[in-house]
Image: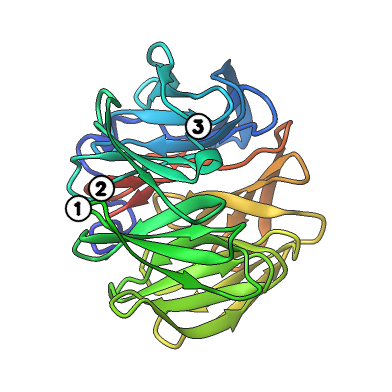
Amino acid sequence: MYAAAGAGMLSAVARQARSLVYVPESLSDYVDVIDPSTYRVIDRYQTGARPQHVVPAWDMHTLYATNNLGNSLTPIDPNTGKIAGPNIAVDDPYNLYFTPDGTSAIVVAEYFNRLDFRDPHTFALQQHVPVNCAGIDHADFSADGSHLIATCEYAGRLVKIDVATRKIIGYLDLPGSSPQDIKLEPAGHIFYVADLKRGGVHLIDGATFREIGFIPTGADAHGLYPSRDSRHLYVSNRRGASVSVIDFATHTVTATWNLPGTSPDMGGVSVDGTVLWLSGRYHDAVYAISTIDGHLIASIHIPHRPHGLCVWPQPGRYSIGHTGITR
């Protein structure tokens, strides 16, 4: 799944972008910009109320800050690192995805329990898709792009949706759970789902839509990020103050990077794969973590609960959204 997103495999569009880390302050209306070469904040600009994530468009020409209380998207030019125009009005954009074929943007309207399919350029509404799934917030697509699976943290369940017909295929309850981020494995069959309450990762067979395993990691498992060589999955354990490294081939934890005094949340991996960037949501910080041995390279102060940061550019042919899922 990530064969075109290996170390240094930047598209012609992505190569034009400035190397920056964009950090939304989820309790304000600002996005901070970090220079990853100096680990310093070099810019800060107003976007809209409660920016939750910074999301690359499918074609990688634009980044969007998703301002869920501001009911808007703020476009950012990745070539300049600056705001690229007026805010775009959309309902409650907690998160944002793009179908793998690039024909639709999907605004995750968490408050309304809804996925809104929109034009990927103008964001004109194509269709509302209501779900019986409170707290819908993260999603990923099957290998062929025919369906998506989304997590609903307040309902403790997953929902599977046919992308072409936009019909709900079914729900999968995970008792005692609070599912968070979700990522498809490199082989394209199993979805990994982080679980805040159970402190680990569910393995979900995408075809049968059934749980086939569970891997304990740490308290408040939240974000999931494949390594550049697609051999490992980094799991941020937010209240566990650690990152777990899962081997995709064996479905086992091969390392745990303990980071006392931190709350690793969401982010992404550097272009060369040597640094994992994560927001420290409960410590007003951003962390740069070595993927070689897990040591903390830098901690950068960012106020007001930094959340879904985006490391840009990213390798890959196209983006399916969130904080930079590329294929």
Counting residues from the N terminus, which is met first, the one under dot 1 or under dot 3? 3
Please say whether residue 284 is visible from this viewpoint. Answer: yes
Give the number of marks.
Answer: 3
Counting residues from the N terminus, which is met first, the one under dot 3 or under dot 2? 3
Residue position marked by numbered label 3 in the rendering: 92
Counting residues from the N terminus, which is met first, the one under dot 2 or under dot 1? 2
Distance Cα–Cα, label 3 vs label 2: 19 Å
Residue 99's disc number: 2
Q: Report the mark closest to the observer, 2 or 1.
A: 1
Q: Residue at x 78, y 44 (%)?
A: 283
- Amino acid residing under circle 3: Asp
Dot 2 crowding, Cα within 10 Å, few <14, some 14–19, many 20+: many
Dot 3 crowding, Cα within 10 Å, few <14, some 14–19, many 20+: many
The front one of 163 and 203 is 163
Residue position marked by numbered label 1 in the rendering: 165
Rendering coords of residue 204 (x, y %): 42, 77
Q: In which quarter of the view is residue 314 placed?
A: top left
Q: Report the mark closest to the observer, 3 or 2.
A: 3
Distance Cα–Cα, label 1 vs label 3: 23 Å
Q: Is residue 149 above or below residue 26?
A: below
- Amino acid residing under circle 2: Thr
Say whether residue 301 is left or right of residue 88.
right
Rendering coords of residue 90 (x, y %): 42, 25
